[in-house]
Structure formats: C-alpha cells, structure tokens
Image: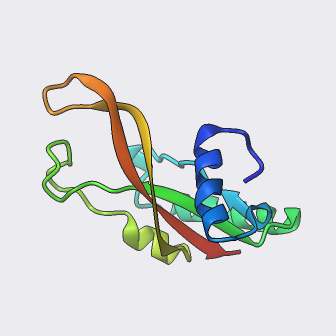
Amino acid sequence: MISDSKIVHDVKEIFNKQKTDTEKYYYYGEIIILPEFRGKGLATKLYFAQDKVLKEWGFEHACILTVIRENDHPLRPKHYNSPDNIWKHLGFFQTGHKANFHWPTIQPDGSSNDASNTLELWSKKI
C-alpha cells in the first residue's frame, strides 16, 4: 500500500476510514492466466509464492479488489463462474467495503465509455 498509483490511493482511503494501518497491507494486482493454462493450480502457486515473499518483507496482510457485476450484466460470459471461491481458497475474505473507480468500459454495443465500476475489497492475513 506504499505505491502512488491511483487505485492504491483510493484503497488507502477505505482503510483510513476504518482507521486501519495501510503500511502492513500489500495490494495484489491482477494475475491473469491464459485459458489454456487454467485449472492447473498456477494462480494458487503464484499467490502462495507471493505470500511467502511478502511475509519476508514484513507485510502482515494482503488485499485485492474485485469488480462487482450484476448477474444479468450484458457482457457477462454465458458460462461465467465467479472467482469468489478461488479467493476464499486463497484465504481472502470479503471485508464488506466497496469503492467506485472510473475506467473505459466496453458497452453492450461494443463501444467504450468512461464508466463507474463498483469494486469490493477482500483481505487476508499472511
């Protein structure tokens, strides 16, 4: 949480409202596994390896943000599986804190416009 990036700054605001020390938290960005390599445990191995390094660096917690989409969102894939079970398997829990971020978002007609996206904060003890 010592980065100057916009998303980390906004996550710090969530923590500051809760009077939580952000210096003990590490914000995980995305790990994206290509479809042909999914289901082989690679993401789990990567997160656990990161956890080990973070512990060595003195961090006590890790956190992530996940995008919240309605079940009937027009761009949700037909056979979408929520990653919530993966986050729980990795030891994360939903904190109940949410934030809104703006970024260019693809619309159902294929166009893109700046839109507000709601994200939920997850955390875990390392």
Q: Position of residue 13 (x, y in %)?
A: 62, 55
At a point 31% along the width and 63% down the height, the residue shown is 82
Apparent side of residue 126 relative to residue 120 in the rendered image (left or right): right
The quarter of the picture where residue 68 lies is: bottom left
Q: Quadrant of the N terminus?
A: bottom right
Q: Quadrant of the C terminus?
A: bottom right
32 shown above or below 52: above
Apparent side of residue 86 relative to residue 81 in the rendered image (left or right): right
Q: Colour scheme used in the picture?
A: rainbow
Q: Position of residue 61 (x, y in %)?
A: 70, 70
Apparent side of residue 116 relative to residue 124 in the rendered image (left or right): left
The quarter of the picture where residue 112 lies is: top left
Q: Residue furthest right?
A: 57
Apparent side of residue 46 relative to residue 116 in the rendered image (left or right): right
16 shown above or below 89: above
Q: Residue furthest top?
A: 111
Nearest the viewer among 63 and 7 is 7
At a point 70% along the width and 70% down the height, the residue shown is 20
Q: Position of residue 72 (x, y in %)?
A: 13, 54
Nearest the viewer among 42 and 88 is 88
At a point 77% along the width and 72% down the height, the residue shown is 60
Q: Position of residue 73 (x, y in %)?
A: 17, 49
At a point 13% along the width and 27% down the height, the residue shown is 109
The quarter of the picture where residue 79 lies is: bottom left
Q: How many discs appear? A: 0
Nearest the viewer among 63 and 84 is 63
